[in-house]
Amino acid sequence: MSNIASSLFSVKILNCGFIPDVPRWQYQKASIPTWRFYWNPEPGAWVSSHAEDIALTPDVAVLIPPQTPFATRSERVFAHFYVHFSLPDIASARRLIWKLPAQKILAPCIAGNPGALTFRQLNMAAAAAVNSALLMLPESALCQEAAPAGNDVFNKAMQIIENDPGFSCSCEELAKLCQSSVNTLQRQFLKATGVTVKKWILNRKMEYAAQLLIYRGSSIKECADQLGFADRYHFSKVFKLYFGITPAQFVRSGGIPLP
């Protein structure tokens, strides 16, 4: 069995949805701990990485591996189908955005009227789309990636953060845990993810918060406790600054595409 075939059984859908009216999609220096799949049934939005600007037209779907620095923009309200997923023990050999033919990936129910799908149907369609997209990648893109030489501090830090979604140490404290200087830790993080340590930790917490709220039905207080916030009010304040809406609004909307 090839690496691609075996990896398909490890796909875990973390969050997915179809939003008919995304009002704003202006994000700079995004870098997320999980995979992303995006498709828009109408033009009006772009995603860019490494100086490449990709227009999200109906015939284009994009796949973004973890730790890939990217930016987004839009010129008007647009509809958006998104999937956040993980692929345990698999990493992209190159952190870049994969541009794929949407007509070969999307099931007819998605390309036709995704807004009419039930929650369960949407999750099934999302899993099908992700697996189809992964099958279109070259096999080298889904091979387990060896740790980059000279990146030991980054790898140690990532292991610490990923093992504790509520990790709240400062950059100085994390550097000590990694037996490194702050400058070395920050330099390796920026090189690997395109964002600072502080930003990455915030991304990780908010990613996990979205999963707790949408898929596990956790209360706001439970999220605050698990993620190391002082109380639900502090968590709600940080959440709103990050997503633009409160946790309660986030749950009612079924989640939004990207922090």
Image: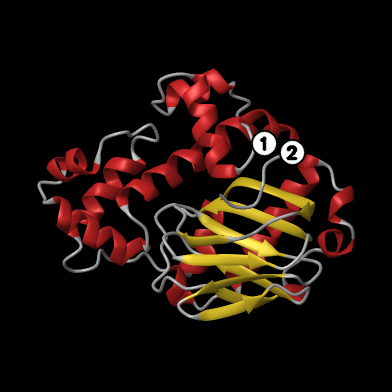
User: Is 141 above or below relative to 224?
Assistant: below
Residue 32 located left or right of residue 220 = left
Task: Say which residue appears at 58% left-offset and 24% top-offset.
Answer: 218
What amino acid is labelled 2 in the image?
Ser
Could you say where residue 214 lies in the image, as x and y percent from the top left?
A: 64, 34
Task: Say which residue appears at 48% left-offset and 70% top-offset.
Answer: 2
Residue 11 visible in the snapshot: no
Could you say where residue 159 lies in the image, as x and y percent from the top left?
A: 28, 46
Q: Secondary structure at mark 2?
A: helix
Q: Which residue is mark 2?
A: 253
User: Camera-side residue: 170 or 133?
Assistant: 170
Query: How far apart are the alpha carbons under marks 1 and 2?
Result: 5 Å
Residue 218 located left or right of residue 76 = left
Number of marks in picture: 2
Task: Say which residue appears at 18% left-offset and 42% top-offset.
Answer: 172
Could you say where residue 48 lies in the image, as x and y percent from the top left?
A: 55, 73
